[in-house]
Amino acid sequence: MKFIDALRKLLAAAMVALFGVTAGAQPATAPAGEPTTAAEAALQDKYGDKVTLEDYRTYRRIVDALPPEQLAWEMVLEDQLGGFYFPIHLKSRIKPDFNAFTSDWGYIVDDPDLPRILLIGDSISRSYTVSVRKLLEGKANLHRAPANCGSTDSGTKNMAVWLDQSGSQWDIVYFNFGIHDRKKTPEQYAANLEKVIELLQPTGAKLIFARTTPFRVKDEGDEDGAPPLNATSDAVMAAHGIPVDDLHGIVVEQIETLQGEDRTHFNAEGIKLLAAHVAATLEASMAEIEAAEQPQ
């Protein structure tokens, strides 16, 4: 017994020396870079050095203390944002001055007296989300899908998740798919757009489709890849009576000064122009909805 007691004391002393804790307790802080759970090991495998364990543990402490709906939102983001965007969100989320309103994927607490609008789209849409939200402050609750929405394949797979943000009741859904569908045939793209529309229509929301903005794919020539996609989407939307917002047309004449070096994404001036146009489109649509609801 004395031997066992001595061994216990030796183990306790070793735990204090190594981790600052008593035997039987978990270390307050694990050795840097060493996973302590299967989830953390999987995190390392998934993100490599894009997310440190220290930052992830900080993130988990923050989000685990959130109200249930906000915690659920963060879990959706972790699932949907993927290996590129989740590390960006995490680093933003753990900052002391984090502000959901000015975050691409911040949890938006609705003003119940204002319309609910959802933006669905890829990185072009993401880039103008916050600017549009600021322009519509006090006029609408502007949300975006919890993802870089990518192609219509992703849309058909994930739409139910994207729509479910504190309920699925939306007044307007402003959406785009195109750049990530560039390798599809027109028939494949059209068929997928039909599926997306079928998933959106039950919301009862006013649907607005944004035409794909100019883009040039590396090593595939210098021509704008958007017109063939827009011809297909124009035809599908016309068949369903869904208005089309011509984001392509408002930037194409100035494209050399509005896009960055990748000739797809927009610089600050381009984002500002797109945001102003999208906000104006949404305001006009809200006015139309309000007018239609007035007694005749």
Image (cartoon, grey):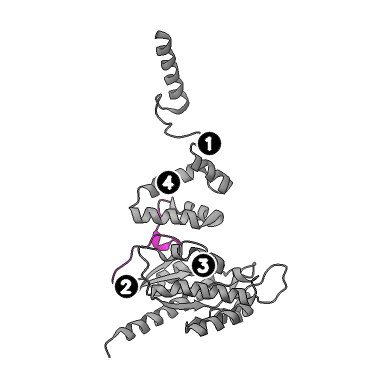
- Secondary structure at badge 2 equals loop
Task: Return the residue at label 3.
Answer: 156
**Mark 1 → mark 4, Cα distance in angstroms:** 16 Å
> What's under tag 1, amino acid-wise?
Glu
Task: Return the residue at label 1.
Answer: 34
**Mark 2 → mark 4, Cα distance in angstroms:** 32 Å
- In the image, residue 150 lies at what x, y percent? 55, 65
Foreground tag (1 vs 3): 3
> Relative to residue 22, is residue 157 depicted above or below?
below
Answer few, some or many: residues within 10 Å of disc 2's Cα (few below 14, many 20 plus, some between 14 and 19).
some
> What's under tag 3, amino acid-wise?
Thr
Task: Return the residue at label 2.
Answer: 114
Residue found at x 64% / y 67%:
262
Task: Return the residue at label 4.
Answer: 60
The one of 42 and 55 positioned closer to us in this rendering:
42
- Secondary structure at badge 4 equals helix
**Mark 1 → mark 3, Cα distance in angstroms:** 38 Å
> Can the viewer see residue 213?
no
Whichever of labels 1 and 3 marks the residue nearer the N terminus, that label is 1
- Secondary structure at badge 1 equals loop
Residue found at x 30% / y 68%:
111
Image quadrant of residue 27?
top left
> Relative to residue 124, is residue 78 depicted above or below?
above
Whichever of labels 2 and 3 marks the residue nearer the N terminus, that label is 2
Whichever of labels 2 and 4 marks the residue nearer the N terminus, that label is 4
> What's under tag 2, amino acid-wise?
Leu
Q: Residue farthest to the top?
A: 2
What residue range appears in magenta? 95-115
Image quadrant of residue 114?
bottom left
Answer few, some or many: residues within 10 Å of disc 4's Cα (few below 14, many 20 plus, some between 14 and 19).
some
